[in-house]
Image (cartoon, helix red, strand yellow):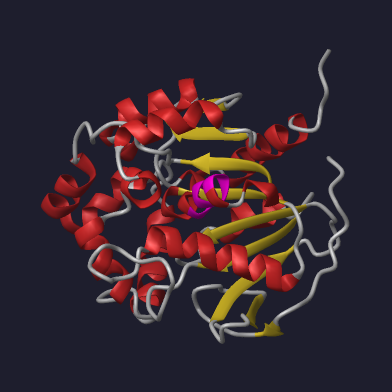
Amino acid sequence: MSMQEENIIASGEPYTDPRMAENGRKITLDNGRDILYCEFGAENKEIIVTGAIYFITFNEFLKELAKNFHVYGFIMRLDGDGEEKNPDGSINWTRQWGRDIYDAARKLGIGKFHYVGKCHGAMPGWYLVKEHPECLLSLSSISASLHAFPPDADEWTERQKAEGPKFALNTMKKKENLIKKVEEAKVVGNTGFQGSQALADMAIYGSRSEEAFFGDYEAVKAFLPTIETPVLHIFGSEDLLYYDFKTSNEYAMYHTAGAKFVMLQGEKHLMEMDMPKLLAREVSFFIEGTTLEYE
């Protein structure tokens, strides 16, 4: 594993919240804002930071990473105040999540770290690539990329509306994981997920990365070749969201400077549930490769 600067790590207070399932903690930022996180692998020196709206079924993947890394999983909050604004004054949550995680990492005394995120959870990583690349050792972006083109389709949303609860079966390879997702949905529903301020704002502005970070598609195209942070793109070949943004995903894979990409054949959107060990292995292999010097 790579060497990184020595971190002087603070620790938040133990905190129980169903969105974290286990090892929960809370830290209060200088602005008074509480940030929740879970923590695994504290015995390891090299740090991975990730963000998600909840860590429940995601935890098996984090535990696999924690065999080699000190992993911090920050909850991406769905309400409250923020500094990152949309034109109408509402909070730009895509950017705010990244800012919260950056501020929390600084508060904890985390210096440089690897960011690993999936779908919405990858967006804080892209925020950091643009706004604070000095803190990043690498970015592993799973099932998400910066959008350089309009969507190709909206099959995810259309099928979700048409199929209702049965739609979940389209997102996983192992059907036995459906029970876990149903239980997770009950927990999430009890923590303000539905009807939250963040989801209401995102219904208007979406999580369109080109608007959140750059303003338009052409700016994204200009930015991708300038990135100096090592980037890994991971997608599942059967992930509906990959095809909804296929043109952008492929463009990002080929035009992000120095990037690597992995297409996991036959995998669907919930690959962290279907194959957490394989997914963690791909991320770990990439991170280790970022430290190698080639002649």
* Quadrant of the rendering where the N terminus is positioned: top right
**Position of residue 219 measured from the top left corner of the image (x, y, whole percent):** 37, 35
Q: Is residue 125 magenta?
A: yes
Q: Which of 234 and 266 lies nearest the eye of the viewer?
A: 234
Closer-to-camera residue (179/57): 57
Tell me where the magenta segment starts and ends, as one range. 124-130
* Residue 119: x %, y % from top left: 42, 48
Considering only vertical position in the picture, is 63 above or below 259? below
Q: Is residue 65 left or right of residue 29?
A: right
> Which residue is pictured at 39% across the width and 24% down the height?
250
Answer whether residue 266 is visible to the viewer in this image.
Answer: no
Could you say which is closer to the camera, residue 60 or residue 113?
113
Where 64 sits versus 235, above or below? below
Quarter of the C terminus within the rendering: top right
Tell me the residue at 47%/22% (across/down): 255
Residue 177 seen: yes
Which image quarter: residue 238? Answer: top left
Q: Residue furthest left?
A: 162
Name the residue at 80% across, 65% down: 42
Residue 190 part of the magenta-drawn span: no
Query: What x and y, as percent, mark residue 157?
Result: 19, 49
Residue sitting nearer the eye, 68 or 91: 91
Dominant SS of magenta comes to helix
